[in-house]
């Protein structure tokens, strides 16, 4: 039995439908990430899970019990959950008092509060700031105080809305480590919304893609990023190479696809004659100067149309009779002496191809 289950959940704000028929199960102890563009409904879903809002329709179950059936049970469930918002609010008080607040509300003894808060401040590395006013801290430190305040009561479920938005890389790394430690050491079930897709890949056991208020796809990171269900998801998760083609043949699951009168081989259960999209992640494309240097099924000569440098990576645009983008290291680009107008060989394996039927 899943810890949290939502069935046909819908939400409306005036005339706008914010969620459309969301059905989802979240397992006890897992980290589940919600990704999707702004306005897709991620925060709305978190607020419904936390019982902050009532849904327009649908059901929410916790441990198999209907949360909405009884106000008493709903209150009990709220005590088992806590939520940290994208812009956390801290009180105009010390770090210690901020973290201690939910324990005081719950009637813990002064001694117990002292022990729990001290331990939590040590976990987040802010014990030296316990007497400092929380509103004087940096953005990353404020977020850690908010996480500590949320976790000091040892909730079963932690809901996070963009937990590292607008923070520096050092703070992001610290907060991600905290999130994983809460999950692994305390068994906390974590549901988080994030715009940072790489963060979802790093932290989540499973990922749900929300687009246009609907839950489009749920699966492990490999499923979402390497086998997107449709073109909308493919574009959102960074598949830059999306080509239209027609299946020419299918022999035992190995398909041959006509793309701009070039032939690409991949793996699919689509049949001959079907119009399809061919999806190739740019990091799966290898570049070389010699035709003989690759054993991949797909090998094409192409002319470099553009180069874009970003840190240690280089994005290479190619014209292979069809447009193709490769993502390689800057070191590889330098070794190959790549420049616009130069001809190279681009290769990719049949297993790197994801085929989607035209809708």
Image: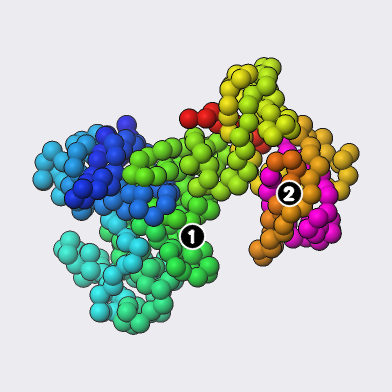
Residue 121, image x and y in percent?
37, 70
Report the front residue among 201 and 123: 201
Q: Residue at x 81, y 42 (%)?
A: 301
Reading the image, the residue beneath label 2 is 318
In the picture shown, does residue 331 fall above or below 32? below
* Left or right relative to 347: residue 96: left
Q: Residue at x 64, y 40 (%)?
A: 280
Classify mark 1: helix, strand or loop: helix
Q: Which residues are magenta?
A: 323-350
Report the front residue among 113 and 209: 209
Classify mark 2: helix, strand or loop: strand
Magenta-colored stretch includes residue 307: no
Circle 1 residues within 10 Å: few <14, some 14–19, many ≥20 = some
Q: Residue at x 33, y 44 (%)?
A: 213
The quadrant where residue 20 appears: top left
User: Looking at the image, can residue 190 be seen?
Assistant: no
Spatial CA span between label 2 and label 1: 39 Å
User: Looking at the image, can residue 297 be seen?
Assistant: yes
In the picture shown, does residue 45 fall above or below 170? above
The quadrant where residue 286 appears: top right
Which quarter of the figure is the N terminus placed in? top left
- Number of numbered discs: 2
Residue 139, image x and y in percent?
41, 73
Report the front residue among 11 and 262: 262
Reading the image, the residue beneath label 1 is 177
Report the front residue among 140 and 109: 140
Residue 320, image x and y in percent?
75, 42
Q: Residue at x 47, y 59 (%)?
A: 176
In the picture shown, does residue 85 fall above or below 139? above
Mark closer to the chain start, 2 or 1: 1
Labels 2 and 1 touching (C-beta < 8 A): no
Residue 88, image x and y in percent?
32, 67
């Amino acid at each position: 039995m899943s810890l949290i289950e939502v069935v046909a959940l819908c939400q409306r704000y005036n005339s706008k439908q914010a969620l459309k028929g969301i059905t989802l199960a979240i397992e006890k102890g897992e980290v589940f990430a919600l990704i999707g563009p702004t306005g897709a409904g991620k925060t709305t879903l978190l607020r419904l899970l936390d019982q902050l809002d009532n849904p327009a329709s649908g059901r929410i179950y916790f441990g198999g019990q209907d949360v909405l059936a009884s106000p008493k049970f709903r209150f009990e469930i709220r005590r088992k959950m806590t939520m940290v918002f994208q812009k956390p609010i801290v009180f105009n008080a010390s770090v210690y008092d901020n973290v201690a607040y939910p324990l005081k509300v719950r009637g813990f003894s002064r001694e117990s509060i002292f022990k729990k808060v001290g331990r939590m401040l040590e976990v987040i590395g802010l014990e030296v700031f316990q007497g400092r006013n929380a509103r004087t801290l940096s953005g990353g430190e404020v977020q850690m105080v908010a996480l500590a305040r949320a976790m000091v009561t040892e909730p079963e479920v932690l809901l996070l809305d963009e937990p590292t938005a607008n923070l520096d890389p050092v703070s992001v790394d610290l907060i991600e480590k905290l999130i994983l430690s809460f999950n692994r050491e305390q068994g906390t079930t974590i549901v988080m919304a994030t715009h940072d897709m790489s963060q979802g890949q790093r932290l989540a056991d499973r990922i749900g893609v929300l687009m246009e208020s609907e839950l489009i796809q749920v699966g492990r990171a490999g499923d979402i990023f390497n086998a997107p269900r449709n073109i909308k998801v493919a574009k959102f998760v960074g598949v830059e190479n999306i080509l239209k083609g027609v299946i020419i043949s299918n022999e035992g699951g190995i398909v041959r696809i006509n793309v701009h009168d070039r032939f690409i081989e991949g793996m699919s259960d689509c049949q001959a004659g079907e119009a399809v999209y061919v999806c190739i992640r740019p990091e799966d494309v290898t570049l070389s100067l010699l035709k003989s240097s690759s054993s991949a099924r797909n090998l094409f000569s192409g002319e470099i149309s553009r180069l874009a440098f970003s840190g240690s990576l280089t994005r290479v645009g190619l014209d292979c009779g069809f447009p193709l983008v490769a993502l390689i290291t800057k070191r590889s680009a330098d070794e190959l002496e790549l420049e616009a107008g130069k001809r190279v060989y681009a290769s990719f394996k049949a297993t790197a191809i994801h085929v989607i039927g035209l809708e």
